[in-house]
Amino acid sequence: MPKGFVLVEDGTISFKASQDLYKKSVGLYLCVVFDVEDGEKEVSFDIVPSVNGQRRNEKSGTLGLFDTDHMWFQFFKPNVLWGFLEGAVDFVAGATLKSLGYVMQSDPLEDALKVELEKNRLMDPASLFEDNGNPWGYGSSGWKRLCKKLEHMHGGRDLIY
């Protein structure tokens, strides 16, 4: 798991985003590390997010054929994030979840909103990545740039597993 991503202990992400934070939200990045079972397998997944108890924007699919452990990144736009967010990543076939992490990108926050986040403890402050850059610039081959930027912001530490 790259530094800067908040490691999820029980496989389920859960936090609450205020409306003010939602207005500044750019999106949510997931990092999923998985083990491939018994040689080359086609890996299928389900991502089931719910906001305020209602399922939203479920995502299912096949990642392709893999024969070794793998790290997978997924980005979600903020149109599903406002409220109390919970979600899980499940592998339907071919793999098992090794670790799950997330980070939420926002535009730079005003000091008052930072104080509110710390005071109310609705989410882990370490999960917030303030950057007004285009999130699509991190897609595909740009994931390495995102990881490097997060590592730099968190003191340039090595990867954790």
Image (spheres, grey):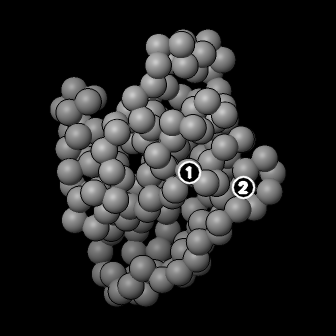
Residue at the image position 20 percent from the left and 51 percent from the top: 145
In front of the other: 75 or 97:
75
Q: Which mark is residue 50?
A: 2
The number of numbered badges drawn on the structure is: 2
Q: Are marks 1 and 2 in contact (CB under 8 Å)?
A: no
Kindly report which numbered mark, 1 or 2, lies closer to the viewer in this rendering.
Answer: 1
Q: Which x, y percent locates residue 160?
A: 31, 42
Q: Is residue 48 visible?
A: yes
Q: Which mark is residue 78?
A: 1
Q: Is residue 122 above or below residue 8?
A: above
Q: Amino acid at mark 1?
A: Pro
Residue at the image position 45 percent from the left and 59 percent from the top: 75
Residue at the image position 71 percent from the left and 41 percent from the top: 83
Q: Circle 2: is it few (<14), some (14-19), or many (20+) Cα within 10 Å?
A: many
In front of the other: 54 or 96:
54
Q: Which x, y percent locates residue 122?
A: 65, 27
Q: Earlier in the sequence, mark 1 or mark 2?
A: 2
Q: Amino acid at mark 2?
A: Ser
Q: Is residue 91 left or right of residue 158?
A: right
Q: Is residue 99 visible?
A: no
Q: Which x, y percent locates residue 50?
A: 72, 55
Q: Quadrant of residue 140?
A: bottom left
Residue at the image position 34 percent from the left and 59 percent from the top: 136
